[in-house]
Image (spheres, rainbow, N blue to C red):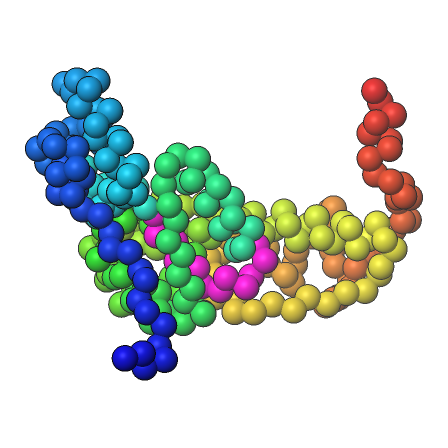
């Protein structure tokens, strides 16, 4: 009797035992063929490959990971994936990892330090081969405690953690970026400006440790006041920046 539900037509995943039965070889022989072992005859290899193709067999990735002691995966925790800079860094990291044969597992903490901790624990349970971390908070004690137990390589993206955690660090040069932004505004002829910042609890070196905003000098001149930029003649801009470059050819 048909109750109106669609029949379950999902095909059961073939096992290595079924491959061995179809090829009429031992399971260990199938394993040697699939792992590229040199001590396999051409005739046996052909039979096993034919059975694999017929059954559409796919090796068990988790079982392979246990045998080789590596999952070929890297966990990436980001504080806010909607941040354009973080999105760009993430895309670049994924491309490099993919080229090296690794997959990237991405988790977003939504700027909540507690989620940082949970995501790191999750990656530990998944036995990732490394972690890239752009944390919502680098001062959250629970996160630091968990990081102290991680036994795979860690790369911190623009974050500082205690030295004893043993993490590598990649830092942005924020001072150079701000100088470039101010230069651009001055070149456009702007003489006044404001800057809106988020949380300011950041290590001094990440801002480019200097005199601070009250006494910072740009191009050797003291700022005339909060939010004021020194006027200077606007530099002419070419409508097509590629053309003057090509003119040197």
Residue 66 vertical placement versus 182 (above, below) = above
Numbered range of the magenta stretch: 74-85
Of residue 62 and residue 90, the one placed in the foreground of this image is 62
Say if the magenta span includes residue 196.
no
Residue 138 vertical placement versus 6 (above, below) = above
Residue 69 shows up from this direction: no
Residue 213: image quadrant is bottom right
Residue 147: image location, x then y, percent: 26, 56
- Tell me if 226 is positioned left or right of 11 in this view: right
Residue 56: image location, x then y, percent: 30, 43
Residue 126 vertical placement versus 17 (above, below) = below
Q: Residue at x 10, y 36 (%)?
A: 27
Residue 159: image quadrant is bottom left
Of residue 19 and residue 145, the one placed in the foreground of this image is 19
> Which quadrant of the rendered structure holds the N terminus?
bottom left
Of residue 211 and residue 170, the one placed in the foreground of this image is 170
Q: Residue at x 31, y 78 (%)?
A: 2
Q: Residue furthest front?
A: 1
> Which quadrant of the rendered structure holds the C terminus?
top right
């Amino acid at each position: 009797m048909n109750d109106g539900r669609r029949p379950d037509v999902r095909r059961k995943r073939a096992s290595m035992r079924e491959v061995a039965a179809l090829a009429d070889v031992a399971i260990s022989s199938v394993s040697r063929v699939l792992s590229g072992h040199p001590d396999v005859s051409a005739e046996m290899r052909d039979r096993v490959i034919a059975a694999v193709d017929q059954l559409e067999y796919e090796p068990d990735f988790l079982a392979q990971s246990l045998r080789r002691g590596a999952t070929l995966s890297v966990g990436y925790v980001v504080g806010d994936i909607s941040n354009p800079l973080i999105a760009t860094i993430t895309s670049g990291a994924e491309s490099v990892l993919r080229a090296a044969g690794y997959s990237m597992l991405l988790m977003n903490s939504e700027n909540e330090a507690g989620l940082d901790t949970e995501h790191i624990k999750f990656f530990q349970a998944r036995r990732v081969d490394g972690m890239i971390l752009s944390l919502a908070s680098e001062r959250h004690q629970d996160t630091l405690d968990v990081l102290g137990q991680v036994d795979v390589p860690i790369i911190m993206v623009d974050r500082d953690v205690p030295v004893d955690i043993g993490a590598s660090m990649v830092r942005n040069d924020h001072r150079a970026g701000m100088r470039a932004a101010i230069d651009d505004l001055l070149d456009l002829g702007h003489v006044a400006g404001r800057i809106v910042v988020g949380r300011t609890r950041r290590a001094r070196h990440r801002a480019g440790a200097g005199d601070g905003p009250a006494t910072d000098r740009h191009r050797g001149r003291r700022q005339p006041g909060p939010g004021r930029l020194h006027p200077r003649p606007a530099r002419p801009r070419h409508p097509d920046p590629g053309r003057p470059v090509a003119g040197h050819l």
